[in-house]
Image (spheres, rainbow, N blue to C red):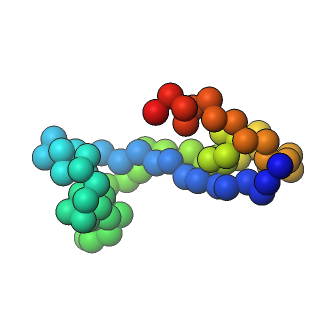
Amino acid sequence: MSKHRWTAIFTVELTDKEAAQAFTFDHHGKQVLLTRFSGDNPRPMDGVIVGCYECELSYADALGKPCIPDNTIKSQI
């Protein structure tokens, strides 16, 4: 068993062009995503999901419990 490895997954609205650029996730793609959270008119996030990358449980379900790694979701990617 190990410590939880917390991650956050968020959604943000992108245009078609921004989505294509972000898909590459190269330097330019990362810049596209970063601009959604800065500047004069940042687009609001629709929601944030926090959970453990290792045991694949949500924060609420994993909090206070030991981390037992589960590769169910990661093995499907």
Q: Could you say where residue 53 lies in the image, as x and y percent from the top left?
A: 62, 47
In the picture shown, does residue 3 fall above or below 13?
below
Q: Residue furthest bottom?
A: 39
- Return the x and y of residue 13 as percentages of the image width and height: 30, 45
Q: Quadrant of residue 58?
A: top right
Compared across the picture, whether 42 is left or right of 7 comes to left
The residue lying at 56 percent from left, 45 percent from top is 49
User: What residue do we see at 73% from left, 54% from top?
Assistant: 4
In the depicted view, which residue is nearer to us: 62 or 36?
62
Q: Is residue 54 left or right of residue 44?
A: right
Measured as percent of width and height from the top left, residue 63 is found at 80, 49
Give me the residue at 67% from left, 55% from top: 5
| Location of residue 31 by image quarter | bottom left
Instruction: Please state the total of marks drawn on the protein image.
Output: 0
> Visible in this render: residue 70?
yes
Q: Residue at x 18, y 44 (%)?
A: 20
Q: Is residue 9 above or below residue 57?
A: below
Q: Nearer the viewer, residue 31 or 36?
A: 31
**Relative to residue 14, is residue 29 depicted above or below?**
below
Residue 39 position within the rendered picture, expressed as x and y whole percent measured from the top left: 27, 71
Residue 41 can be seen, yes or no: no
Image side of residue 6 versus residue 31, left or right: right
Which residue is the extreme one toward the left?
A: 17
